[in-house]
Image: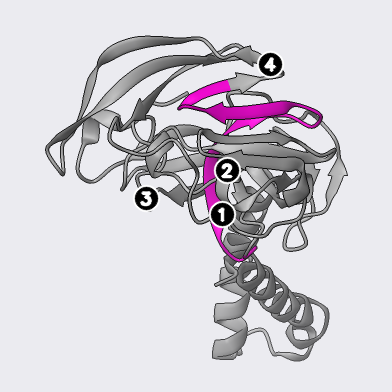
Amino acid sequence: MNFALILFLLTMATGAIWLFDVLLMKKRRSPDAKEPWWVEYGASFFPVILAVFLLRSFLVEPFKIPSGSMIPTLLVGDFILVNKYTYGIRLPVINKKVIDLSTPQRGDVMVFRWPEDPSLDYIKRVVGLPGDKVAWQNKRLYINGKEVAVARQPDYLHPDRLYYSEQYLEKLGAVEHRIILDKDAPAFVGQVMQFPGRDKCLYNSSGVTCEVPDGHYFVMGDNRDASSDSRVWGFVPDQNIVGKAFLIWFNFGDLKRIGSFQ
């Protein structure tokens, strides 16, 4: 469901009713005449829908985390807020950038439209920038030939499944964040799709090495062995970017998570 398009159409429809009433119908009604129900409801809802549309399109947008690919940073059921203007102002619905403010940086947690199906929104961490050489070999991350620093942390206990994963503190650019690895998971990347720029990636039994094309980004989940990401389906084009995630605003199962994240 394209909620942005639905909201846009509702804004246009209620706005047209409000404008039609102001410019034409109100002048023809007697002062004591009651407004038709469709005018009353349309004109009443227009400012509310317009405010939601503008807020969601240009400032912040809420999302719910549907999977565990970003554990331990984000958990299933987290409701997060996404900054829509950090990477530039984009026209709603068509997502075309009209004002360029900044670009994604390594370590950012980014929401984007999945290249394989743009009707779906994905959330991952930015690992590789345009022009970078990114390697995931033997469950270690390398950027431009240099291994990304990690520090061992206490094992992570999955509360819903009661098993442990190895946990590390990783530093990407200026961002320190936790990742988890499952020691029993293989190092190679399985079920690789055919994606644009597939020729820029080399797969082997130890993982994958990719050169990130211009205007694209390489993203990965923090749950490295349980994330379908750029290793599997390729690069994220700039035009697919939605915004930067920055806050957990609610979680029904754990109220202590409210206000955490970045």
Residue 95 image point, x, y percent: 76, 55
**Which residue is labeled 1 in the image?**
192
Magenta span of residues: 117-141
Depth order, front residue of 247/59: 247
Residue 147 image point, x, y percent: 58, 13
- Label 2 with label 1: CB-CB less than 8 Å: yes
**Which residue is labeled 4 in the image?**
145
Please tell me how many numbered marks the rendered image carries: 4
SS under mark 4: loop
> Tag 3: residue type?
Ser
The mark found on residue 67 in the picture is: 3
- Label 1 with label 3: CB-CB less than 8 Å: no
SS under mark 2: helix
Residue 67 image point, x, y percent: 37, 50
Q: Earlier in the sequence, mark 4 or mark 2?
A: 4
Residue 226 image point, x, y percent: 38, 43
208 with respect to 100 (left or right):
left
Q: Earlier in the sequence, mark 3 or mark 4?
A: 3
Q: Residue drawn 12% across and 38% down?
A: 162
**CA neighbours of label 4 inside 10 A, class few (<14), some (14 to 19), many (20+):** few
Depth order, front residue of 173/247: 173
Q: Residue drawn 71% across and 75% down?
A: 18
Q: Residue furthest front?
A: 205
Q: CA distance from mark 4 to mark 2?
A: 17 Å
Q: CA distance from mark 4 to mark 1?
A: 23 Å
15 with respect to 36 (left or right):
right
